[in-house]
Amino acid sequence: MSREAPPILRLQDVSLTFRTRAGAVRALNGASLAVHEGEAIGLVGESGSGKSTLARAVLGLNPERSSRIEAGRILIAGRDVTRLSQAEWEGARGHPVAMVFQDPLSFLNPIMRIGRQIAESIERHAPDRRVEERVGELLALVKLPPSLARAYPHELSGGMRQRALLAVALACEPRLLIADEPTTALDVTTQAEILALLRDLREQLGMAMLLITHDLGIVSSACERLYVIYAGRVLEWGRSQDVFGAPAHPYTVGLFQAARADRDAQGRFATIGGEPPDLGETAKGCPFAPRCPSAMAECIQSMPGVTVVGEAGSHAVRCWLYPPAQDAAATAGHVFGS
Ligand SMILES: Nc1ncnc2c1ncn2[C@@H]1O[C@H](COP(=O)(O)OP(=O)(O)OP(=O)(O)O)[C@@H](O)[C@H]1O
Ligand SMILES: [Mg+2]
């Protein structure tokens, strides 16, 4: 992994608003993160914290009419893609970034055979490839038998559908795979199989991964670094071992405690006390302050800057319990987790 090259993905202070009948929803509020070539990164946070919105923003998949990136930049391999038009996205989609979702059925075409769907993805993104041969290679890569090329999505089990969707995504030969809750809908055994497959694919293809999950256990075993998001803001990030070893933000502490104490059948967090934030309000301070057991007056007044809490660059937090250094330059390099 080269730290000289630009990260494969960088979000710089991205704010995104949905227009709804009930008013504006600020789903991302200055979110920043970086994924370097070959890295496995986790993105965790409660339901509604903006994880899927962030992932979709990278690929221009949020509804064009009702969503707007108000501020910030999204860079893919150094290229600014923040305001790509839909047509430009069509050309760029899946390359060098591809995405798989929690529910493969909502993405796979129900009336098209799996092999054809993989072939279309190849034709769109890697047209110089010999398509039939490549379909076979991709099925083998995701450990599906060649005969599955002739199957329709509804004929497959949940785990097989997720593999088929992965094959469609990998047809683009992505350098970054964004996986949004790829195993949440699966039983525990199938979950483990898909996670093992993702690990193998990363090793084999050298691709980076942004793994979105409720399951902190998955993050600790599969991801080198993680970002913790709440109300569209990244509140803490760092090397998995450092954040798990010494979570700094009270929200992260709450997530970890809740995960240890009580998981439901889907492996989701037990809720932290208090109500999730109202994203219609543009709070000046830390969005977690109303629920935070350690909240102080300044937490309601303004959002703190970045404080490095671990050794150089390995762990950082935005929380008034850890006042930012006076020397902004000292922390600037860590703002995006680089
Ligand atoms: N298309 C949309 N129109 C309006 N609001 C939306 C839309 N998509 C998401 N939101 C809102 O944006 C906020 C963030 O949602 P998002 O789906 O990104 O959360 P999430 O972290 O992925 O949650 P989950 O863990 O449940 O998948 C929520 O308040 C959600 O209701
Ligand atoms: Mg989501």
Image (cartoon, rainbow, N blue to C red):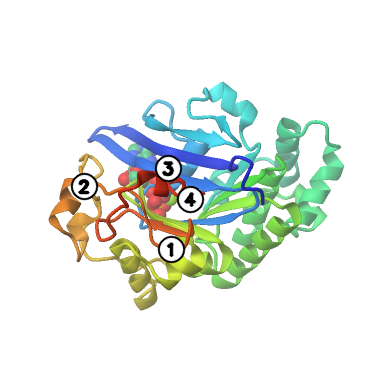
Query: Mark 1 against mark 2, which lies toward the viewer?
Result: 1
User: What x and y, as percent, mark residue 188?
Assistant: 55, 71
Q: What amino acid is at disc 3?
A: Thr
Q: Secondary structure at mark 3?
A: helix
Q: What residue did someone put label 2 on?
A: 285
Left or right of 40? Residue 317 is left
User: What x and y, as percent, mark residue 137?
Assistant: 82, 50
Check mark 3 vs ligand 1: CB closer than 8 Å? yes or no. yes
Query: Mark 3 against mark 2, which lies toward the viewer?
Result: 2
Q: What residue did someone put label 4 on?
A: 337
The residue lying furthest to the left in this view is 297
How far, Cα to Cα, is label 3 from label 1?
29 Å
Q: Secondary structure at mark 1?
A: loop
Residue 266 seen by the camera: no
Q: What amino acid is at disc 1?
A: Gly
Q: Secondary structure at mark 4?
A: loop
- Residue 53, numbered label: 3
- Mark closest to the chain's N terminus, 1 or 2: 2
All told, the count of numbered labels is 4
User: What x and y, as percent, mark residue 233?
Assistant: 34, 47
Give the crowd class for mark 2: few <14, some 14-19, many >=20 residues within 10 Å.
Answer: some
